[in-house]
Image (tube, rainbow, N blue to C red):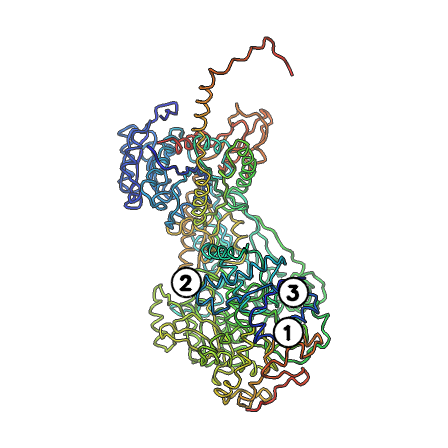
Amino acid sequence: MDKVNGNHDVRIGFYVCQCGHNIAAMVDCAELAKYVGQLPNVVLSRDYKYMCSDPGQELIQKDIKEFGLNRIVVASCSPLLHEHTFRSAVEAGGLNPFFFHMVNIREHVSWVHTDRAEATAKARALARAAIRRVAHHRALEVKKVPVHPDVLVVGGGIAGIHAALTLAKAGKKVYLVEREPSIGGHMAKFDKTFPTLDCAACILTPKMSEVGSHPNITLWSHSEVVKMDGYVGNYTVKIKRKPRYINEDLCTGCQECISHCVYKEPKFHDDFNEGLGKRKPVYIPFPQATPQVVLIDPEVCLNFKRGVLTDKCKKPCVEACGDRKAIDFKQKEELKEIKVGTIIVATGFQTFDVGRMPQYGYGRYPNVYTALEVERLVNASGPTAGDVILRDGCHPKSIGIIHCVGSRDKNTNRWCSRVCCMYSMKLAHLLKEHTEAEIYNFYIDIRAPGKGYEEFYDKLLEEGVHFIRGRVGEVTDWAFIPEEEGKLVIRVEDTLAGVVRRIPVDMVVLATGLEPQADAQDVRRLFNMSCGSEGFFLERHPKLAPVNTFTDGVYLAGCCQSPKDIPDSVAQAGAAAAEAMVLIDKGHIEQEPNTAFVVEAECSGCKSCIPLCPYTAITLNEGSKKAVINEALCKGCGTCVAACPSGSIVQNLFDDEEVFSEIQGVLAYD
Amino acid sequence: MTKEWTPRIVAFFCNWCTYTAADLAGVSRMKYAANTRTIRLMCSGRVDPQFILEAFARGADGVLIGGCHPNDCHYGEGNYKMLRRFALLQRMLQDLGIGEERLRLEWISAAEGEKVKSVINDMVKKITALGPLDLPGKCADWDRELTELAPAVEPAPVESEVTHA
Amino acid sequence: MKYSYFPGCSLKGTGRAYEESLLPVLKVLGVELEELDDWNCCGATAYMAVDEVKACVMASRNLAIAEKAGHKELLAPCSACYLVLNKTKHYLHESPVVEAVVQKALRQANLSYSGNTPVRHPLDVLVNNVGIEEIKKHVKHPLKGLKVAPYYGCQIVRPYATFDDQYNPTTMDRLLEAIGCAMVTYPLKTRCCGGSLTGTLPEPGLLCSYILLKEAITRGADLIATVCPLCQFNLDCYRDKMVGRWGNETIPDPRNKDARVPVGPYLDIPVVFFTQLIGLAFGLSEKELGLQRGFAPMRKPACAQPQPAAA
């Protein structure tokens, strides 16, 4: 029989939640309550439909008062979901919240097992363990850690921009760090946005310009975060500012240096125009760049050789700059260190590498384009001033747009990239407007879930765009009949008509999907985040906490969390800003008091624990020659507790007695 | 009550990775064997070798430890500390006659709900094949054996002086 | 290097030019082959389509004999044999049912197969084991100016593409470039030749082969190099039927792109095994390499332009 543990009168209230059908369907809640009711120290044992609801919580509070309970155990869902809810309820009932323990019989039992008897037996074992454990719980106070009021936003796309602006307007000081020389992200490259066909630059540039001029925002473009130290509310972040060779404060953006460059014609790969246009060694990424500052590319500028200054060039750019003296070839990389309380990660996405689908002919056939390339092609400020002229100089009379390139495919990326159907239709509309060509969209399903999206699809149908349902097998240039010679032939099964078709076109557009940035794994380690199995940053809960991460104080916004369109990115950015504001305005964060402390009398001064702590929270007290733990630095991992040979380190909420009693509880025979 | 024996496995899961992955398995309604009893800890580094031995001593047939992948520990390096202890403990268990296949360490990240399912199913299969460990039962048997044998053993003559080696 | 050698039925029959050219080429390169003792038909595509388990049993007998022979690896030049043997290995590994039936059947013949003998293709061995540099050393008469359309066929890239890219293989391209040939851009490298359809459903079967020939001609190739006896047979042996059906279709004149000419006369473009080309470059004789077995004669490279054939 169980022995009574604890040295004072322990009075436990035990509650089983049926969670509607979620738990009750697989676990016999009434039986469980009855079983626990006869265990030592259990004063009352109930089963109830929804413990987390208001009446459920009030029931606990009533019972605490009526029955003089001093321990509460609830068997329901995962503590990761509702531990906080119940702790608050217990506290409202007048009991220290850490006299509460939770048993997971939903995610770990009722949802994952199929035999009712086995599930109920497991629930009994887990409940018994909790009953034993909770007797050892002590009253604890939450740790209050002050939160630094400044915020770091990483990534200057539309999500990062919106988050930064929201916080800045609320009076917070924001650091916005962007890797590229200008903010704007992918949205700056688009021509028009669906479904309203707003010009992307027209709606984006006012926000960009606001960021550039807002007194509360420190914009560091052409910069990257290299290290993050500290803990929630108190992060120390090192940022590397890459050299532009231009003094940002002195440059007025007049671009005289560009027109005077020794290179009379631009001849280097232009990243912003997706390689369709060229630029000079000194350049501005695009006309509306923010900051409105040029930069010099040391890989191709004559004054450098392989990035090292040689001083070989006449430097007409410096002469053109004149009195402003903004060009500084000796500029070096700068390391900045800032202190912030919260961080919002909005690093965006990269497009699918079409080289992974060789059957679509990108690279092999000059007239196969990616969607981003077409955005630049139809753009009035693009390399062809909006004239849709192909690489071989022709104007297309027929265009095929292939949906789902790289997405919804076991061989490449399993997920749906969410925006491609809409942007494919948008491009169909724009291309038809620019070229009057016959346009064919090849789709698997048309996904048009947003506001005005289905209506946009209707409009396209009325415009005479052909929609063919079928996954394109191949884009090829071998002709079956003379009419196909010189064209690109799209081979596809038209699944609605039930035939395999060959459709000759002049131009093929690949609707490439969205995937995580190439360095997502490095970035997530930098911020102590996790990634999901697809590689996007992991949110704390997909439904209830889509902008929080598992690290307090670090939030997500935009496509770095999962593919989404602009309205959703902006919404998420606002949400992340709000979450950050919760911490900042409260001024402190409450941390779980699961820190460790040394029982001085039992410490032998062996110093085994000191090198183990990743937060250097343990030091040797020179006077007593015993180990001492700095509570403010301790994060509660418990490594030192397990390592201490004399067992003199105790961890609140997870001390040895509590864990041993749990082990004994799960294994005690029925 | 005679019940067909089925293994009982105590699982120590770290809060940030493996416990979350087990929750994900639940949310995804994946189905797996009901033989594990999970104990939640903040980090796999908190797992004291004494916990593992206690579990076996109290009747566990297997012990599973779940932590974050190397380099991904929420607290930096706790999982490496666990790995060190695990390596030593495995050798000890061999000597104790417990058999190192009964102790298993897995790195399971928060997104790997599927791995939780496959690891548990696999471990249950392997331990079922090994049979029950039943240390409490064995200890009770040995105690009984000794008490039965005791009267048959002549007490040794008491040394009048203590000899030093 | 020594390999066990599984010729398969084709290489002793209609595809004997493949064996005739492969063996001397490998001899020049110092690769020794030992033909499997008492090998049997692998079943090829036909039996696999009728009864997969029995087909595996038949194929695995050869694998078991190869294992007994003791050399590390088995060379199977014929694409169908290559694929069937590899498929059998996969099934043995993945399906306990197939494994059980096969091992039981093998035991009846006092054989067994542990699953460890890799099955290799000559392209793989030549490029990856012998090496392009080594092959270049033995080239006596580089086939300069010979424009070749490299045709791989489907079975060495689908469903398994172990030694080359599945969509755009290049091992043969690299090999033939090493002996001086110029590869033409050929988008139909791995398109089906019709396979057995030329025998069972001639209408679509012939069309598949015809498409391959037509595209090679349109691209300006002097000849087509193949790796598979059935592909070579399909492309080579039905020219009269193709001329009859499609001879009047027009293509851009290979010499003058603005004009169009009927494709018929060009349909006698030679179709050879890649080993025959390598043999020519090594200085071996036409007779040795079985070049006379082709339906469309392939003269020595200097005059390799196709001549209009008598209708």
Residue A256 in sight from this viewpoint: no
Q: Is residue A214 above or below residue A612?
A: below
Find disc 2 in the rendering and name its residue: A418
> Whole-percent x and y of residue C12?
58, 72
The residue carrying pointer 3 sits among few (fewer than 14), some (14 to 19) or many (20 or more) residues within 10 Å by Cα, namely some
> Whole-percent x and y of residue C148?
61, 78
Residue C33 is labelled as 3
Q: Quadrant of the N terminus of chain A?
A: top left
Question: Along the horizontal axis of the image, is C36 left or right of C30?
Answer: left
> Whole-percent x and y of residue A550?
45, 46
> Whole-percent x and y of residue A643?
54, 32
Q: Quadrant of the C terminus of chain A?
A: top left
Subunit that carries the residue with mark 1: C
Q: Of residues B72 and A414, which is closer to you in this image?
A: A414
Question: Along the horizontal axis of the image, is A625 left or right of A369?
Answer: right
Question: Along the horizontal axis of the image, is B115 left or right of A315?
Answer: left
Measure the alpha-carbon separation of dots 3 and 2.
56 Å
Residue A563 is labelled as none
Measure the alpha-carbon separation of dots 2 and 1.
57 Å
